[in-house]
Amino acid sequence: MSDANASPSKPREISGKIVLITGASGGLGRCIVPALLAAGARRVIAADRSLERWNDAAVEPIVLDITNRNGASDAAMRLADDVDVLINNAGHNHNTRFLEVDDPENALREMQVNYFGTLNMIRAFSPAMRRRGHAVIVNMLTVGSHVCFPNMGSYCASKAALHSMTQSVRAELGFCGVDVVGIYPPAVDTKMSSHVPPAQKISPEDVAAQLVATLCNGDEEIYIGMAADLYERARREPKAVENMLKGRVAPVN
Ligand SMILES: NC(=O)c1ccc[n+]([C@@H]2O[C@H](COP(=O)([O-])OP(=O)(O)OC[C@H]3O[C@@H](n4cnc5c(N)ncnc54)[C@H](OP(=O)(O)O)[C@@H]3O)[C@@H](O)[C@H]2O)c1
């Protein structure tokens, strides 16, 4: 009997490929770049908001703010014909609630980077990928795309929107041979989650290794470590999970 919940799986090759990754110098990006090279990637285009140094001739640093639609289009005009794999890793998290925040722009900024910025990249790079008829787009999501952590509610909402967009572009691009992959980690030990106790987060090296494995084995999505358990529980008993997470919010005076 076929499993209606299983995603299709066809092995993919990283060896010899050209990969562009955004947010390459962040905590996770710094681990994903060497993991891609170790898996045989021919060239990694490492995109950041400012020019970064990489001590490897196979890494080509570029400057790219994903919220700048023209910047994304310019990068695609130069590079999209070469890029086999686009990893949308850049992300932003103010770690704030919807209410009782100093700056009401926080929620907007998270949507601009996590949702619209990623959309800018996909819109810019996918036409060349469709023409070629084979490519992979990887979106860096989070278990918070499925369950809301109220202390970072606006971030979770932006990643929930990105999850929905991931499904939609997967449907739109699947006919043209372009795979869209979702990566759903739990808290990761980077600057973004520096407030999270060590026992509740995994290493960025682990996430990088699992991202590369997912790329190679052809899966459409992966829930990593504690994210898998929480996601499964949220599917089985969504109200229990919502109430558990609600209990973590201390009232603000
Ligand atoms: N850390 C976690 O707990 C965790 C868990 C699940 C998922 N994730 C996701 O994993 C990804 C990487 O996060 P991380 O943990 O590595 O965080 P990080 O260390 O804060 O890195 C984020 C990266 O994104 C870049 N970025 C932010 N805004 C950008 C923009 N407008 N244009 C281009 N680049 C931009 C940052 O550049 P600047 O340094 O210039 O700001 C930085 O390089 C994010 O999508 C995040 O949401 C993280």
Image: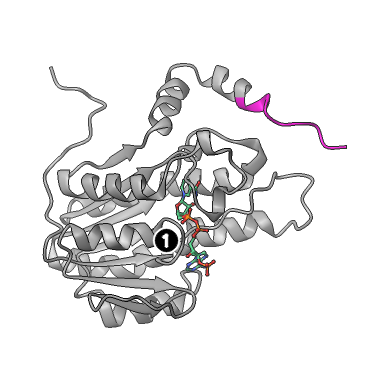
Is residue 217 visible in this depiction of the protein?
yes
Q: Is residue 176 above or below residue 238?
A: below
Q: Residue at x 35, y 50 (%)?
A: 205
Q: The magenta stretch spans which residues?
A: 245-253
Q: Which image quarter holds the C terminus?
A: top right
- The kind of residue tagged 1 is Leu
Residue position marked by numbered label 1 in the rendering:
119
Q: Residue 130, percent across and down?
A: 19, 64
Q: In this view, does 187 lie above or below 43?
A: above
Q: In this view, does 223 lie above or below 229?
A: below
Q: In this view, does 57 lie above or below 145?
A: below
Judge whether residue 252 is colored magenta: yes
> As rendered, which of 132 and 37 lies closer to the eye?
37
Quadrant location of residue 128? bottom left
Q: Residue at x 53, y 39 (%)?
A: 198
Q: Which residue is drawn at 43% across and 67% down?
A: 25
Residue 230 as seen in the image, left or right of residue 87: right
> As rendered, which of 26 and 150 lies closer to the eye?
26
